[in-house]
Image (cartoon, helix red, strand yellow):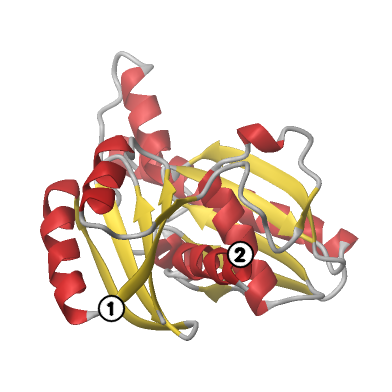
């Protein structure tokens, strides 16, 4: 049985085709390309369910999928989950964070797991060895830091980060901005990981998200980088509810 897991953002869409829990195909592209790609996937696979994790506006996309006659499941606060959710306001918990915790439950049941998603925001989500989601943290992502420094000051330019070593001591405005944003974020992540390791034994750390690969080589702590973790968690929720 084939499931199509969809990570639907504001401008980007990711598809994961799963058969018997195994990722058979991955695709990422813009919203404009996503509908055409779905038609292509329909011809290549017999899709049982289209599971959608939408952090952007999903109405038009969901309507399109339903008009194709496909079964649609949109992840929400009402979805039955494969872990205990102890978040005080579950109705405000982002569906992307729900899917990531499900991925942690699928791959590491009975373990303490910290999932770090380095995207527009950086989210930290913790599931303990009793398979209880305890909560986490949200902070500005890398590009948000660069954009904020530019937009909230009169003289600082907006820059793109260089994919190279960034010295702690910046010798001009560009390198000072890069040091503050990149090394500051790395220090934040390492510091939070150290706190979790101090308070929870045998901690497994997952790093995912658009900036995950960029940051992974700069972090001192042992981590597992997995760019498809959200899609894997979303597929697991679909399988859990079906079974």
Q: Is residue 187 visible?
A: no
Q: Is residue 78 visible?
A: yes
Q: Nearer the viewer, residue 123 or 8?
A: 8
Please give the residue where the numbered disc 1 appears in the rendered image: 46
Q: Residue at x 59, y 68 (%)?
A: 103
Q: Secondary structure at mark 1?
A: loop
Residue 162 lies, in percent from the top left, at: 28, 55
Disc 1: CA contacts within 10 A as few (<14), some (14-19) or many (>=20):
few
Quadrant of the image occupied by residue 178:
top left
The x, y position of residue 85, in whole percent, is: 76, 50
Residue drawn at the location 40% of the way across and 35% of the way down = 144
Q: Residue at x 30, y 50 (%)?
A: 161
Examine the rendered structure and indicate whether residue 236 appears above or below residue 132.
below
> Which x, y percent locates residue 3?
40, 72
Identify the residue shown where x is 26% and y is 57%: 69
**Residue 223 vertical position relative to residue 173 in the rendered view, above or below:** below
Residue bearing mark 2: 241
In three-dimensional space, the C-alpha distance between marks 2 and 1, rounded to whole angstroms, equals 19 Å
In the foreground, 173 or 51: 51
Classify the position of the N terminus by image quarter: bottom left
Work out whether residue 188 or residue 87 is closer to the camera in this orientation and state it.
87
Q: Quadrant of residue 200?
A: bottom right
Look at the image and tell me in which quarter the C terminus lies: bottom right
Residue 128 percent across, percent down from the top left: 82, 63
Would you call the spot at circle 2 few (<14 residues within 10 Å), some (14-19), or many (20 or more)? Answer: few
- The tag on residue 24 is none
Give the mark nearer the N terminus: 2 vs 1: 1
């Amino acid at each position: 049985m084939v499931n199509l897991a969809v990570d639907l953002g504001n401008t980007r869409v990711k598809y994961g085709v799963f058969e018997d829990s195994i990722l058979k195909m991955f695709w990422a592209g813009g919203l404009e390309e996503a509908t055409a790609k779905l038609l292509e996937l329909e011809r290549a696979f017999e899709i049982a369910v289209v599971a959608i994790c939408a952090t952007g506006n999903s109405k038009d996309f969901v309507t399109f999928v339903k008009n194709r006659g496909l079964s649609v499941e949109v992840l929400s606060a009402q979805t039955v989950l494969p872990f205990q959710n102890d978040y005080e306001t579950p109705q405000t918990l982002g569906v992307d964070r729900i899917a990531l915790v499900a991925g942690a439950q699928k791959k590491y049941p009975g373990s303490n797991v910290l999932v770090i998603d380095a995207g527009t925001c950086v989210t930290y989500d913790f599931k303990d060895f009793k398979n209880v989601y305890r909560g986490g943290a949200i902070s500005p992502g890398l590009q948000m830091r660069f954009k904020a420094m530019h937009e909230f000051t009169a003289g600082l330019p907006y820059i793109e980060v260089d994919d190279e070593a960034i010295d702690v001591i910046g010798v001009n405005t560009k390198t000072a901005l890069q040091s503050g944003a990149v090394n500051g974020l790395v220090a934040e992540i390492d510091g939070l990981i150290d706190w979790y390791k101090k308070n929870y034994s045998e901690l497994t750390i997952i790093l995912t998200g658009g900036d995950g690969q960029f940051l992974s080589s700069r972090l001192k702590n042992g981590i597992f980088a997995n760019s498809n973790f959200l899609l894997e968690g979303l597929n697991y929720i679909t399988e859990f509810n079906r079974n």
